[in-house]
Image (cartoon, helix red, strand yellow):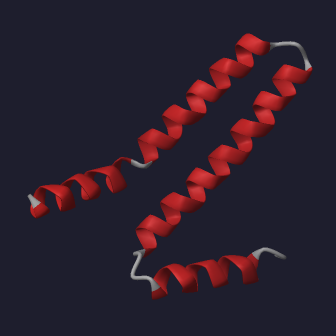
């Protein structure tokens, strides 16, 4: 796989910064959802289906929000700890 060295390097950077493996997985999943959503929306718009493209964008945003909930929860816990 030609992306393996890139992924390994990104994981090393995140590990060096103290970011856990669970968060790295969430980040990679979010990036994949962004790419898939963008391609889907572009295909729909090229086909003249602007309403479907808008719906795909909405579902993509919802999916990213859903898988980011653990990060959001931990962020709110850290803010609560500071207050």
Q: In which quarter of the image is the N terminus?
A: bottom right
Query: On the image, which quarter does residue 7 sit in?
Result: bottom right
Q: Is residue 81 left or right of residue 19?
A: left
Position above or below: 13 against 74: below
Q: Where is residue 25 in the image (x, y as percent from the top left)?
A: 51, 64
Which residue is most to the right? 46
Position above or below: 27 against 44: below
Q: Where is residue 36 in the image (x, y as percent from the top left)?
A: 72, 42
Query: On the image, which quarter does residue 12 sit in?
Result: bottom right
Q: Is residue 23 left or right of residue 13?
A: left
Q: Is residue 43 left or right of residue 67?
A: right
Q: Position of residue 35 (x, y in %)?
A: 72, 47
Q: Nearer the viewer, residue 75 or 37?
A: 75
Q: Which residue is found at the position 28% from the left and 57% from the top?
A: 75
How many numbered discs, if any?
0
Q: Which residue is found at the position 77% from the left and 14% from the top?
A: 50
Q: Which residue is found at the position 57% from the left and 25% from the top?
A: 58
Q: Quadrant of the C terminus?
A: bottom left
Position above or below: 9 against 75: below
Which residue is most to the front? 83
Q: Where is residue 16 in the image (x, y as percent from the top left)?
A: 47, 88
Q: Which residue is found at the position 67% from the left and 19% from the top?
A: 54
């Amino acid at each position: 796989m030609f992306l393996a060295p890139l992924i390994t390097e990104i994981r090393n950077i995140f590990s060096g910064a103290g970011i856990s493996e669970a968060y790295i997985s969430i980040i990679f999943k979010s990036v994949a959802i962004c790419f898939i959503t963008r391609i889907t929306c572009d295909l729909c718009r090229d086909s003249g289906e602007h309403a479907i493209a808008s719906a795909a964008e909405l579902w993509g945003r919802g999916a990213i929000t859903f898988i980011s909930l653990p990060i959001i929860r931990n962020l709110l816990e850290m803010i609560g700890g500071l207050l």
